[in-house]
Image: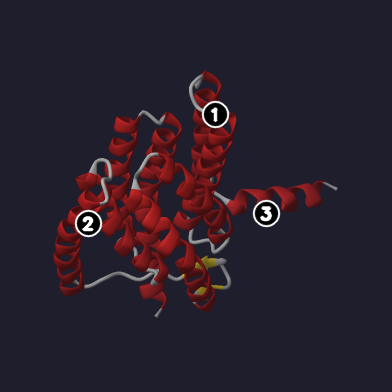
Amino acid sequence: MEEKNTKLMTKITGFMTPFQYFEVLLLISFTAYFVMIDKESTTLYLAINALSAICGVFCVVLCAGGKKSQYYFGFVNIAAYIIIAATGKYYGQVALNLLYYLPTQFIGMYMWKKHMNIEKDVVKSKKMGINQIGLYLLGMTVGVIICRYILEMLGGNQTWLDSTTLVISLVANALMVLRYKEQWALWIVVDIITVTMWVLAGDWIQVSMWSVYLLNAFYGFYQWSLMSRNNYANE
């Protein structure tokens, strides 16, 4: 009996690290608090918002650990977040999630399944070269300027913030699908900007969610750096 309990605990703790469990509990606590004190939003809006936040944090912490199960939570998070972003008139966020994140969930799941470390049940990560990094930075700068102009014509809010997060997120998600550790440096930038955007909007559930995302991005960069180093050492 004791041996069975030990195996069960090993399986549970292997799903996420203690730090990741802390992140999830922190986000759930903040979400529950802001739902209870919110007297202006509708019950439906709060339910969708909470669902987005909770599934979102599971998605990012599992991604930081290189677990392909992150995509299952990602599906739900994306669907709920589209509604929240549309309500706040953040059209860049709506387009990003509806037209890009949603379909790339299927692509990412396929790509990760092909490049898993079977023994450790984590994805094999890679790192970029200097020339690759320079080209991506140049492309993102041009993309932000063009995107901001389009969002201005659509009458969006906080268009510089919205366009910057949109373009950098496009690149960061592509790097995630391709398994590059540098995605996490971009997610750090995206999370800082998005936290600012939702603070200005006054949506504290989303502020909580993206703040935990930010904390997780630093952890993810550390974890994927170790994973990448180990992959190269084993080659």
Label 3: how many residues lie within 10 Å, few (<14), some (14-19) or many (20+)? few
Q: Residue at x 54, y 42 (%)?
A: 54
Residue 222 visible at all: no
Which residue type carries mark 3? Lys
Residue 204 position in % (x across, y down)? 41, 29
- Measure the alpha-carbon separation of dots 3 and 2: 48 Å
Q: Residue furthest right?
A: 1
**Which labelled disc corresponds to residue 164?**
none
Looking at marks 1 and 3 on the same chain, the residue that comes earlier in the sequence is marked by 3
Which residue type carries mark 2? Ile
Question: Is 22 drawn above or below residue 11 in the view shown?
Answer: above
Residue 15 position in % (x across, y down)? 60, 53
**Which labelled disc corresponds to residue 11?**
3
79 or 232: nearer the eye?
A: 79
Residue 100 position in % (x across, y down)? 40, 64
- Measure the alpha-carbon separation of dots 1 and 3: 39 Å
Which mark is nearer the camera, 3 or 2? 2
Label 2: how many residues lie within 10 Å, few (<14), some (14-19) or many (20+)? some
Which residue corresponds to mark 1? 42
Looking at marks 2 and 1 on the same chain, the residue that comes earlier in the sequence is marked by 1
176 or 197: nearer the eye?
A: 197
